[in-house]
């Protein structure tokens, strides 16, 4: 609830500090005393549109600060926390209004946008008046009132939760569908590219081996002839090896006769024969390596050129072709898996849709029942408010194609203000005074089931009196049993039922050159005098004082 309101340099108010308590607080005063100024200042702290003309003449800026005491789990604290605002203790809304039209907004001394301030204030305060359409202009508020009256918080939360799951499931399906569609567009290329690579089956470091093999085979034919000549010289019929072997045998027989002379020669010839054998083995190995199968060079060249062509086609190196082939294979597997995943996500989205619509159906049935009960309850409140000829009804429409976190119900309050007239939307059919009284009836009906903690009623009793004013006072007092109610009133019947009474008055200062709006907190005697003034007018009579006493006694 609102606990403090501090106003500085706003229109006729130079400095004003007010403390508020629970229950019904009324603000009274003569016409022109500044009641609307006080309300405009309060609205400024709630995020209403600023205006440089609100700043007191001669001042550079004005300021309004509203302090609220709220439960720890109040929705306004969650909204503030979402703006990274510390929400421990009181919630303080402060607005600076500069004479040049600029404004600045603060919540718990943290600078915020006016939109953020307004979102927070919307959870705390509702202002209703004859010309204030904000409370009912949005038909979403009609739905919220029906939900509050029907106690449909759990059902509404179930719909919101189901809607979140549905949106998430649809988003996941849409994202996967887009990815699969892109993959499908590349599917033909992937299949062709993978098949082409798989057919060639490249291996690592193959290019280097093929290039070396090709070079070797191209040179082999030239080398082979010389190798055969060398082999003929070493191992042919005219080779020295056969003669040396014969000479070796003869010298070996002479070794005993002259060992000192023969042994060195025998050893040297033996080493030569060993060397010739080694050369012969090397020549045979070399000749085998040059003995390529006919057509092998052609095959090597074809494969090398094919690998290089494919590498150029894909803008990569030959050594990277095996990895590329694996990537294409993985992409194809992913495409197949994506198709399976897409079907699974589609099934999940369909299931979430069924759950969402089931929750909506449950909520719709509950809303229809709550709307019927609400219509009956409001109807009972209308006759005492001089709306006995009026009829109130809740028009329900369903749009099952609408994807909304609030379900697919569209609710609108409709009224028939006079017998024989056609029912129409509340906002269009009801006059200013009727609208305020309809809102009062609604608020009385739903007060104990869902409301902002502070309700402000601005002169909703204008132009009425007697029993109707008393009925309004009774209902405001009933409302104040569950929420804080502030009422600007001209009706003594309303003022008599207040828990606290403020009188707004203008006083002259600086030799009559300036006028200032003041607010006085009235005690019991002062309340009686003020109510007597409201009854009698400028001249307060003893009869008026007696009537005021009776009103206060009846109200207590």
Image (tube, rainbow, N blue to C red):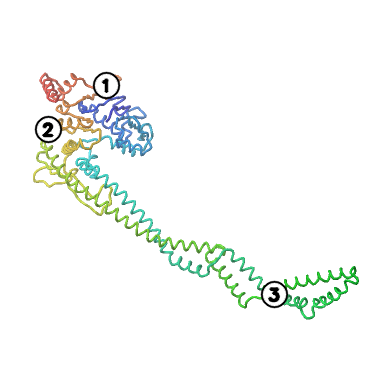
Q: In the visual, does 482 lie left or right of 294?
A: left
Q: Nearer the viewer, mark 1 or mark 2?
A: 2
Earlier-in-chain disc, 1 versus 2: 2
Please tell me in which quadrant of the rendered image residue 65 appears. top left
* Location of the N terminus (image quadrant): top left
> Which residue is denoted by mark 2 in the rendering?
468
Q: Earlier in the sequence, mark 1 or mark 3?
A: 3
Q: Which residue is mark 3?
A: 287
How many residues crowd around disc 1 within 10 Å: few (fewer than 14), some, or many (20 or more)?
few
Marks 2/3: CA distance? 126 Å
Give SS at disc 1.
Answer: strand
Q: Of the numbered discs in the image, which one, if any, rests on residue 306?
A: none
User: According to the image, label 1 marks what residue?
Assistant: 508
Residue that lies at the very extreme toward the bottom in this rendered image:
237
- Above or below residue 509? Residue 224 is below
Give above or below for 118 relative to 168: above
Mark pair 1, 3: CA separation: 128 Å
User: Is 421 positioned to the left or the right of 60 in the image?
Assistant: left
**Dots 2, 3 in contact, CB < 8 A:** no
Asked whether, in this view, residue 243 is left or right of residue 339, the answer is right
């Amino acid at each position: 609830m609102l606990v403090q309101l501090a106003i500085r340099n706003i229109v006729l108010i130079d400095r004003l500090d007010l403390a508020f308590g629970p229950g019904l607080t009324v603000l009274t005063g003569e016409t022109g005393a500044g009641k609307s100024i006080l309300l405009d200042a309060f609205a400024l702290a709630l995020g209403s549109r600023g205006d440089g003309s609100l700043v007191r003449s001669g001042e550079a800026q004005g300021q309004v600060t509203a302090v609220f005491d709220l439960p720890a789990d109040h929705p306004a604290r969650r909204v503030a926390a979402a703006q990274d605002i510390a929400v421990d203790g009181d919630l303080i809304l402060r607005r600076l209004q500069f004479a040049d039209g600029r404004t600045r907004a603060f919540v718990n001394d943290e600078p915020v946008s006016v939109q953020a301030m307004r979102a927070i204030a919307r959870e705390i305060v509702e202002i209703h008046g004859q010309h204030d359409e904000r409370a009912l202009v949005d038909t979403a508020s009609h739905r919220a009132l029906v939900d509050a009256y029907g106690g449909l918080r759990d059902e509404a939360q179930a719909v919101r939760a189901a809607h979140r799951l549905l949106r998430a499931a649809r988003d996941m399906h849409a994202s996967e569908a887009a990815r699969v569609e892109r993959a499908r567009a590349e599917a033909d290329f992937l299949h062709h590219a993978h098949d082409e690579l798989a057919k060639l089956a490249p291996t690592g470091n193959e290019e280097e081996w093929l290039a070396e093999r090709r070079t070797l085979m191209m040179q082999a034919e030239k080398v082979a002839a010389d190798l055969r000549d060398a082999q003929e010289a070493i191992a042919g019929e005219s080779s020295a090896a056969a003669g040396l072997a014969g000479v070796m045998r003869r010298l070996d027989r002479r070794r005993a006769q002259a060992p000192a002379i023969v042994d060195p020669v025998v050893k040297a010839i033996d080493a030569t024969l060993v060397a010739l054998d080694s050369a012969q083995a090397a020549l045979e190995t070399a000749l085998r390596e040059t003995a390529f199968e006919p057509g092998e060079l052609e095959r090597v060249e074809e494969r090398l050129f094919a690998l290089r062509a494919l590498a150029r086609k894909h803008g990569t190196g030959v050594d990277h072709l095996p990895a590329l082939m694996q990537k294409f294979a993985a992409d194809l597997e992913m495409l197949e898996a994506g198709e399976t995943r897409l079907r699974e996500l589609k099934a999940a989205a369909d299931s979430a849709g069924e759950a969402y619509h089931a929750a909506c159906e449950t909520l719709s049935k509950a809303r229809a029942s709550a709307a019927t009960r609400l219509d009956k309850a409001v109807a009972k409140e209308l006759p005492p408010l001089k709306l006995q000829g009026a009829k109130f009804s809740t028009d329900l429409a369903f749009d099952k194609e609408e994807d909304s976190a609030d379900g697919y119900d569209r609710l609108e309050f409709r009224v028939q203000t006079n017998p024989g007239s056609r029912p129409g939307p509340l906002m269009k059919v009801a006059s200013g005074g009727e609208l305020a009284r309809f809102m009062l009836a609604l608020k009385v009906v739903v007060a104990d089931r869902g409301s902002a903690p502070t309700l402000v009623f601005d002169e909703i009793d204008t132009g009425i009196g007697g029993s109707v004013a008393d009925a309004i006072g009774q209902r405001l007092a009933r409302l104040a049993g569950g929420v804080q109610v502030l009422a600007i009133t001209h009706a003594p019947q309303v003022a008599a039922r207040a828990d606290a009474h403020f009188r707004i008055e203008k006083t002259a200062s600086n030799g009559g050159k300036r006028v200032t709006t003041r607010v006085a907190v009235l005690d019991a005697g002062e309340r009686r005098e003020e109510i007597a003034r409201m009854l009698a007018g400028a001249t307060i009579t003893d009869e008026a004082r007696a009537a005021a006493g009776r009103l206060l006694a009846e109200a207590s």
